Image (cartoon, rainbow, N blue to C red):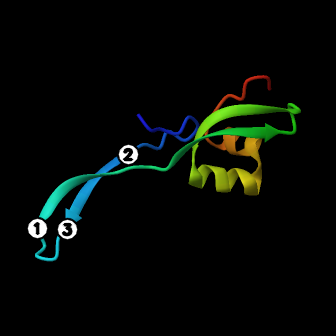
Amino acid sequence: MAKSEITGRRKLKGNQVSHSNIKTKRWQNVNVQSRRVWVPELNRFISVKLTTRDIRTIDKIGFVAFAKKHGYKVPGL
């Protein structure tokens, strides 16, 4: 299943609404990417599955701060 390892975000169920307002169930998938993230505190890369929103936030605040905010234990810290 497509799921972020840190935040736990996964697909949601929603409605597809047609022009005539008929509602049918559909899945809203998250954009999960496997990435190697550089962690300067450890001086190495860590491979994790992240959503694209997670990747953008990590670029802003850093991996360790992001992991601490979401309660993820960084291996090696």
Q: Which of 40 and 18 is in front in this view?
A: 18
Image location of residue 19, percent across then percent down: 16, 76
Could you tell me if the residues under marks 3 and 1 are in contact, i.e. CB atoms within 8 Å? yes
- The residue where tag 2 is placed is 11
**Residue 75 found in image quarter:** top right
State the quadrant of the C terminus. top right
Precedes in sequence: disc 2 or disc 3: 2
Task: State how far apart marks 3 and 1 are (Cα).
Answer: 6 Å
**Residue for badge 3:** 17
Instruction: Give the quadrant of residue 59.
Output: bottom right
Type of residue at label 1? Ile
List x then y, in percent, for residue 71: 62, 35
The answer for how far apart the CA atoms under marks 2 and 1 are is: 22 Å
Residue 4 appears at what percent x and percent y? 53, 39
**Disc marking residue 22:** 1
The quadrant of the image that shows the N terminus is: top left
Q: Which quadrant of the figure has residue 34? A: top right
